[in-house]
Image (tube, rainbow, N blue to C red):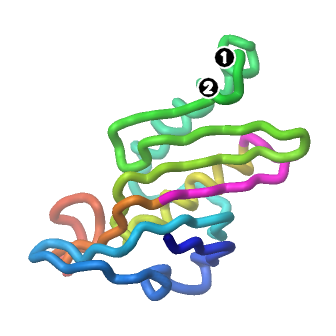
Amino acid sequence: MQVIKDFDFTKRDIIYSLEKENEHFETINYSSFILVNPITEIKFPDFDEPFFKRMDATLKHILYQYDLKWIRSERQVFYTSNECLTTIQFVFRPRRVQINVFQRSSNINNLKEDVQFLNWFSKENFPDKDIELNIFVSMPHIFTDRLTKVDGIEKI
């Protein structure tokens, strides 16, 4: 499995770093990979704002429950959903927070926004901590007939 450390989304395209696995009529699929501390702008992403606003509120609620000791173990500071970002776990260390993310599927053309949200969320909620962000991308792909994850938008 490919591990990509400190990839800078602001300087280059990730697709050139990936191994192509196979091609179908609708998608080109790449091998799974792990991003460790990827670099993006630190701002709320403009793309898919309702999705990211909902995720922001949900993750803040989980952290609120942990702060109030409603969640008593850090191994339970855990988000799951049926979206592409299926799992997010927060692991608290003395001076840092480790954030482990499992992304079941990712259109590579939208990965930057997902990572940008995670970087923004980390800085907003843990401003005085070092952040270790690990993102496992299970099924990276691009669509052959569109650029974005929203069907029919930005046709090629």
Which residue is more in the foreground, 147 or 46? 147
Which residue is more in the foreground, 6 or 51? 6
Give the magenta part as a residue range: 125-136
| Pointer 2 with pointer 1, Cβ within 8 A | yes
Residue 129, percent from left and from top = 85, 47
Q: Earlier in the sequence, mark 2 or mark 1?
A: 1
Residue 96, percent from left and from top = 83, 46
The residues bearing labels 2 and 1 have C-alpha atoms spaced at a distance of 7 Å
Q: Give the residue at mark 1.
A: 71
> Does the magenta-highlighted stretch encompass residue 52?
no
Query: What amino acid is found at the position of numbered circle 1 in the picture?
Result: Ile
Question: In screen coordinates, is 56 left or right of 141?
Answer: right
Residue drawn at point x = 49 percent, y = 84 percent: 17
Figure disc tally: 2
Q: Give the residue at mark 2.
A: 76
Residue 77, percent from left and from top = 63, 29
> Does the magenta-highlighted stretch encompass residue 126?
yes
For label 2, the crowd category at 10 Å Cα-Cα, with few meaning under 14, some 14 to 19 and many 20 or more, is: few
Q: Quadrant of residue 40?
A: bottom right
